[in-house]
Image (cartoon, rainbow, N blue to C red):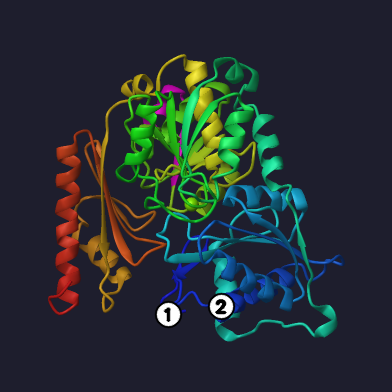
Amino acid sequence: MNEWIVSASGIRGIVGECFLPHDIARMAAAFGTFVQNSHRHQREDIRVAIARDTRASGAMARHAVIAGLMSTGCHVVDLGICPTPTLLLMASELNVAGSMMITASHNPAEWNGMEMATTCGTFLTETERAEVLRIYETGEMQFQPWNTQGNLSKSDRAIPIHMERILASSYIDPEGIRQRRLRVVVDAVNGAGSTITPKLLRALGCDVVELHCEPNGAFRRPPEPTPKNLEALCDRVKQSRADLGMAHDADADRLTLVTEEGEAISEEYTFALIADLVLNKQAGPVVATVSTSLMIDDVAKKHNTPVSRTKVGVNHVVNEMLRLEAVLGGEGTGGVIFPEIHHTSDGITSAAVAVQLLIESGETLSSLVSQFPKYFIAKKSLPIPPSVEGDEIIRRAIAAFNHERLDLTDGVKILRDASWVTIRKSGTEPVIRVFGEARSSHRANRFCEEIAQQIQHWMAASNGGRL
Ligand code: MG
């Protein structure tokens, strides 16, 4: 697999280096074989839905994916450019046997990838993903002869159906929202959410100001919707005197909010704010990852409901949600999962629910945020030198911090009073992520820095003193 990164939901690579057409077609054929094997007893044709985000390499990858899938006898339903949550929603709608999304999510423009999901539109489990990779690596793709190749069809129903589902959900009151005519600035990074989010908000009567909403893949800012990348959005919110700003990543499963004062709030708030609204309407457990802010615990406590924590990655959150019949799940990255719509992170539903939040509370976003207990998160990404094993660093951390309170659900989480630091190998990039949270920025930074320095030291030592 060399330089490809295996993520929780699929694989990613740098275009022109390791994300190459023959590898993409081969991976699609491995997935096609996996899907065929899983539906061996099905008599009808096996269909796989595909879609892509707007990346420049998307058109190339789309052709390779279609070729790979068709060569194993899968009939491909191409949904064109649409968000990951829209594709996964359509999986159950179209009753397909699998789905493949061509995206590298929040990674920079030079990356692309493939995310794979099974019948009902949930990402592959670790075991299923390992099976696809095994087929890829051993070359056990079952290529079909000339007369049983798959065919290709297109569907343009994805965006209207996703919108219909959101508008009909119990999370929002479309009539109530329409009466208020909020002004919202949408920054979709010219990605897959460029069409659907402005359209949905207009259907809710909002006055939408579009920023980076041309689905052309020209990322005018880094695709990760973190506050430091949202300067242009903050300015536009102020200039247009909007009530709210919102930003997606390239495949629109995430959402970050900007207050009416033009301040981008941490992406951690998206889940916490939405949870406060949803738990007002529905009682039941919520699921978060080990790296998600303690804000979710405060919100859950207010509603007298438990929080279950899982490994980082949508599929882990989803599995736990299904097990607990949770009413909401999410991650600190701005991804929120609404089980009434489907079981995957959905930045589009989040956009509608964020508007509902303002209407229902009758407050501004800055005022809502000020009512939350203040936490500060420090995040560091430490590149792993090529000769260093990320897993070895994790093992060293477990041994070194053994005397502290540890949670080993995912990597290492070191817990001290009202603060924590997690040390994890990223699922999507060759980096060790060190996240810390505390009640003051000084404490969060100091704790994170202390641990990061130790890790840098180990990595330098394992790499002959160089980083
Ligand atoms: Mg994403």
Within 10 angstroms of label 1, few (less than 14), some, or many (20 or more) residues?
Answer: few
Q: Which residues are magenta?
A: 297-309
Q: Position of residue 283 (x, y in %)?
A: 56, 26
Q: Earlier in the sequence, mark 1 or mark 2?
A: 1
Crowd rating for badge 2 (residues with CA inside 10 Å; few <14, some 14–19, many 20+): some
The image shows residue 119, relative to residue 272, as above or below, that is below
For disc 1, the marked residue is: 2
Residue found at x 64% / y 34%:
166
Q: Nearer the viewer, mark 1 or mark 2?
A: 2
Q: Quadrant of the C terminus?
A: bottom left
The one of 75 and 20 positioned closer to us in this rendering = 20
Residue found 76% across the figure and 52% down from its top = 94
In this rendering, the answer to whether 100 lies above or below 256 is below
- Asked whether residue 337 appears in the rendered view, the answer is no
What numbered label is drawn on residue 21? Answer: 2
Q: Could you say which quadrant of the image residue 282 lies in? A: top right
- The residue at 20%/57% (across/down) is 401
Instruction: Depth check: give the residue in front, 345 or 319.
Output: 345
Mark 1 is on which residue type?
Asn
For label 1, the SS is loop
Q: Amino acid at mark 2?
A: Pro
What's the distance in space between the residues labelled 1 and 2, CA to CA?
A: 16 Å
Left or right: residue 199 versus residue 398 is right
Residue 137 visible here:
yes
Q: Is residue 10 within the magenta segment?
A: no
